[in-house]
Image: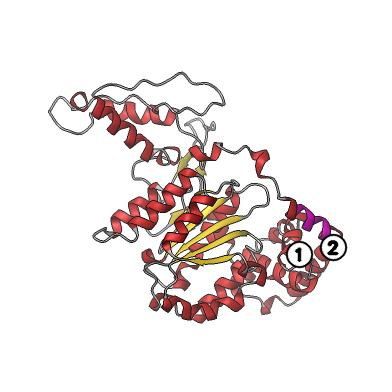
């Protein structure tokens, strides 16, 4: 496994010898959730392809591909799969021949879908995931505050820019290349989100947004490249029944300290927000099985993480499910709780594994529920290697982060 992970596409322009521009092609970095030798469009169908292959081998027949119908989600196999005895090369090897491999991946690419359009995502049309009535009501309540609130935030930043030497060193360095974050992060939508997070308290909302903008400037490279070191198991695993992205995290697969995991945690939620629709909220499942107190005892890391999630991702959580919260983990909750707003604390639910499965079945789509339950199982099973858990993580993520 490499030292970096990438979310979504990194597109590079290809040029011909005469300098003309060719269509974009997608490349990927070494990633926790990357399938070796597979392109971005292919990996999300890897599991389904394997099931089709196994079914055809059992039947001893060849599956045929139905004609494509625009806008129709097909339940037919993705490509024809030859019987096992016909897949062997002339030398008697059990591996695909060069022609077979080329033909297989060509057909798979032709039937692949864009990033994050996994089967369950077509169950709900976009019009069904607009902002909830409660959110619309809250927005109406705070709409008259937006212009004054935005002006106040910009004035605060004018004061900060007059004393740049007091800012973080990385912030100072990045500000030399411009300050587009100020415009991007004072839109009506973001101003309303901050006001909703603190129920209209302008002073507190202003401090939050000023801090959020500072975080975005400080971590500009992180959010623009969407690349970081991988040291935790945190992934966008699917969607709930309201079409919101679901982020799953398992403490057992954490390999470095919480401070080292900050970037990856932030990127996972950044990816989820970018995949979201409507009000941009996310459902979070934190599986605390295998939680390491040693890796998570730094109070400064909790403060830093709370500063990011309490500002950049303020009012982004629709529901938080914390599973198998151990006695040792509870001792650290005292450090994290003051950093979480009262509004967010009301969305947190502490449950055991059995109850978590019931709640997940109620709240998640069928495909996502099956992925989450399989993650619960493999992360608790004895005799399963870290490599096997890693492979499972790759195959149950809908976003490459």
- What's drawn in magenta, residue-wise? 135-141
Residue contact at pointers 1 and 2, CB within 8 angstroms:
yes
Res. 168 visible in picture = yes
Relative to 147, is 336 on the left or the right?
left
Relative depth, front residue between 342 and 88: 342
Q: How many marks?
A: 2
Q: Magenta span has 309?
A: no
Residue at image point 73% right, 68% down: 198
Q: Quadrant of residue 158?
A: bottom right
Determine crowd level at label 1: few under 14, some 14-19, many 20+ residues with C-alpha closer than 10 A.
many
| The furthest residue to the top | 67
| The furthest residue to the left | 92
- Name the image colouring: secondary structure
Determine crowd level at label 2: few under 14, some 14-19, many 20+ residues with C-alpha closer than 10 A.
some
Query: What residue is shown with label 2?
Result: 145
Kindly report the distance in space between the C-alpha atoms of the residues bearing marks 1 and 2: 9 Å
Picture coordinates of residue 251 (x, y %)? Answer: 41, 66
N-term-proximal mark, 1 vs 2:
2
Relative to 25, is 219 on the left or the right?
right
Query: What residue is shown with label 1?
Result: 195
Question: Is residue 303 placed above or below 233 in the rendered structure?
Answer: below
Residue at image point 24% right, 29% down: 58
Picture coordinates of residue 124 (x, y %)? Answer: 59, 39
Picture coordinates of residue 212 (x, y %)? Answer: 66, 67
């Amino acid at each position: 496994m490499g030292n970096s992970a990438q979310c979504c596409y990194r597109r590079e322009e290809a040029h011909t010898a005469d300098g003309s521009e060719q269509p974009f092609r997608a490349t990927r970095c070494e990633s926790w959730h990357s399938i070796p030798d597979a392109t971005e469009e292919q990996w999300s169908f890897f599991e389904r392809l394997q099931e089709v292959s196994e079914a055809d081998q059992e039947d001893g027949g060849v599956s045929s591909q139905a004609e494509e119908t625009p806008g129709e989600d097909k339940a037919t196999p993705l490509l024809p799969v030859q019987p096992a005895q016909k897949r062997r090369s002339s030398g008697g090897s059990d591996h695909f021949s060069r022609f077979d491999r080329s033909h297989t991946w060509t057909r798979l690419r032709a039937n692949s879908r864009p990033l994050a359009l996994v089967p369950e995502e077509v169950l709900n049309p976009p019009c069904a995931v607009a902002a909830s009535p409660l959110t619309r009501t809250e927005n109406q309540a705070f709409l008259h505050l937006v212009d004054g609130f935005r002006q106040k935030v910009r004035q605060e930043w004018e004061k900060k820019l007059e004393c740049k030497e007091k800012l973080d060193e990385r912030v100072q360095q990045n500000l030399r290349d411009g300050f587009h974050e100020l415009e991007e992060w004072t839109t009506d939508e973001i101003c309303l989100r901050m006001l909703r997070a603190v129920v209209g308290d302008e002073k507190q909302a202003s401090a939050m947004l000023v801090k959020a903008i500072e975080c975005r400037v400080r971590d500009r490279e992180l959010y623009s490249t969407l690349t970081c070191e991988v040291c935790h198991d945190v992934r966008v695993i699917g969607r709930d029944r309201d079409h919101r992205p679901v982020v799953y995290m398992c403490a057992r697969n954490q390999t470095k300290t919480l401070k080292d995991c900050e970037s990856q945690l932030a990127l996972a939620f950044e990816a989820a927000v970018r995949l979201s629709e409507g009000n941009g909220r996310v459902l979070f499942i934190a599986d605390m099985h295998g939680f390491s107190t040693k890796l998570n005892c730094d109070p400064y890391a909790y403060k830093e993480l709370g500063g990011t999630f309490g500002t950049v991702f303020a009012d982004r959580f629709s529901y938080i499910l914390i599973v198998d919260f151990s006695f040792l983990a509870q001792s650290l909750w005292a450090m994290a709780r003051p950093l979480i707003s009262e509004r967010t604390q009301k969305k947190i639910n502490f449950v055991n594994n059995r109850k978590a499965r019931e709640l997940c079945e109620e709240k998640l789509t069928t495909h996502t529920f099956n992925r989450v339950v399989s993650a619960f199982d493999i992360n608790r099973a004895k005799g399963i290697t870290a490599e096997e858990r890693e492979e499972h993580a790759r195959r149950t993520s809908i976003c490459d982060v």
